[in-house]
């Protein structure tokens, strides 16, 4: 048979008669034939690779969100016929700032990837701005926030809704003095999550005075913030912007002989493996669905005559465990 017939059998089977298609597929099975992807990519000028830059691992945190998201993205990409290429921004000398576009230009010059997934999104983010100027296709895990003119596709998780569900859960269990431990000012993700706590407290007419702290995202910072709030305001429950901070709260309770869930309730965010092992109630992001939506947006973006898809905002769910129920 001709090469075109075999090509149609693999790529456009609807163009062949049923008996011809069956003969080609039988031959493929007997010969254990696999198409040469490298040759196909040279011909189509498509690598079927999606690039994603990995940030350095942050020490002394309990979060494994990136690991879970990368795995979900790899699986969703594979099902769509793509592979994920992970890269770094390069080494950074002590005292120097990392290049926000480090690694991107190298891949763009070598045409090694078809598109990128960007995970840092904030107003004026050099990655999204730089990739837009370079006309490089990309989608973002995260809203463009205050950038109303952003035209790239994005998928995000409604952090405010997740924290609101957490605060409502605590209110239903009888708590009124519910404290918030969040991140330092400047993080739109952190501000979004705090808004869910503040809105719920206001809805129930509960005071927030003296019941919040803004700290770095480390276990020690969470422990110190919880200790200060317990001494000054005596909250009966904590909602935290991350599982890392919540683990710090658990340490603070342990140092005072207080049982999580029975004496003081604690809720984290991200539903990390640490949260699952420690019995920490936490807000779980639907990262698997985020990955599916991102890959779908990429496919639409790379298709001829594409129209930019609107942003997708997904809702998380609360995983209830003994740190709020006290059931050991």
Image: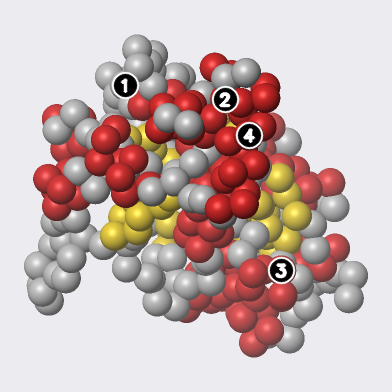
Along the polypeptide, which appears first: circle 3 or circle 1? 1
Which residue position holds label 3?
A: 276
Q: Secondary structure at mark 1?
A: loop
At a point 44% along the width and 23% down the height, the residue shown is: 300
Position of residue 156 in the picture relative to residue 307 (left or right): right
Nearest the eye: 200 or 147 = 147
Q: Secondary structure at mark 2?
A: helix
Along the polypeptide, which appears first: circle 3 or circle 2? 2
In space, the residues marked 1 and 2 are separated at their CA atoms by: 36 Å
Categorize mark 2 by other alpha carbons within 10 Å: few (<14), some (14-19), many (20+): some
From the image, which quarter does the C terminus lie in?
bottom right
Q: Which mark is residue 23?
A: 4
Which residue position holds label 1?
A: 151
At a point 31% along the width and 55% down the height, the residue shown is: 53
Q: How many marks?
A: 4
* Residue 127 coordinates in the image, percent (x, y): 22, 43
Which color scheme does this rendered protein use? secondary structure
Q: Is residue 50 visible?
A: no
Q: Nearer the viewer, mark 3 or mark 2?
A: 2
Tell me, yes or no, whether the two marked residues, 4 and 2, touch with CB atoms within 8 Å: no
Categorize mark 3 by other alpha carbons within 10 Å: few (<14), some (14-19), many (20+): some
Q: Nearer the viewer, mark 3 or mark 1?
A: 1
* Residue 173 coordinates in the image, percent (x, y): 85, 52
* Residue 136 coordinates in the image, percent (x, y): 22, 33
Categorize mark 1 by other alpha carbons within 10 Å: few (<14), some (14-19), many (20+): some
Which residue position holds label 2?
A: 13
In space, the residues marked 3 and 2 are separated at their CA atoms by: 47 Å
* Residue 158 coordinates in the image, percent (x, y): 56, 37
């Amino acid at each position: 048979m001709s090469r075109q017939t075999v090509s149609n059998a693999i790529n456009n089977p609807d163009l062949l008669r049923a008996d011809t298609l069956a003969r080609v597929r039988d031959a493929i099975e007997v010969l254990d034939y696999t198409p040469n992807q490298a040759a196909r990519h040279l011909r189509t000028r498509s690598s079927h690779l999606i690039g994603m830059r990995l940030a350095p691992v942050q020490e002394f945190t309990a979060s494994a969100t990136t690991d879970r998201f990368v795995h979900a993205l790899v699986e969703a990409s594979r099902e769509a016929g793509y592979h994920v290429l992970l890269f770094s921004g390069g080494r950074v000398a002590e005292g120097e700032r990392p290049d926000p576009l480090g690694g991107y230009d190298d891949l763009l010059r070598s045409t090694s990837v078809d598109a990128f997934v960007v995970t840092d999104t904030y107003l004026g983010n050099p990655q999204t701005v730089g990739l837009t100027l370079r006309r490089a296709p990309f989608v973002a895990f995260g809203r463009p926030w205050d950038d109303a003119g952003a035209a790239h596709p994005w998928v995000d998780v409604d952090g405010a809704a997740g924290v609101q569900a957490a605060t409502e859960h605590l209110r239903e269990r009888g708590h009124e003095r519910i404290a918030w431990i969040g991140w330092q000012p400047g993080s739109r993700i952190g501000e979004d999550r705090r808004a869910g706590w503040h809105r719920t407290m206001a809805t129930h007419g509960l005071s927030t005075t003296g019941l919040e702290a803004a700290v770095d995202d480390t276990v020690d910072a969470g422990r110190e913030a919880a200790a200060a709030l317990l001494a000054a305001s005596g909250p009966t429950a904590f909602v935290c912007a991350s599982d890392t901070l919540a683990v710090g709260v658990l340490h603070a309770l342990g140092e005072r002989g207080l049982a999580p869930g029975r004496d003081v309730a604690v809720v984290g965010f991200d539903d990390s493996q640490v949260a699952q092992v420690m019995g920490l109630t936490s807000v779980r992001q639907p990262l698997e669905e985020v990955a599916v939506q991102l890959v779908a947006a990429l496919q639409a973006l790379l298709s001829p005559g594409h129209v930019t898809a609107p942003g997708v905002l997904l809702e998380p769910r609360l995983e209830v465990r003994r740190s709020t129920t006290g059931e050991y």
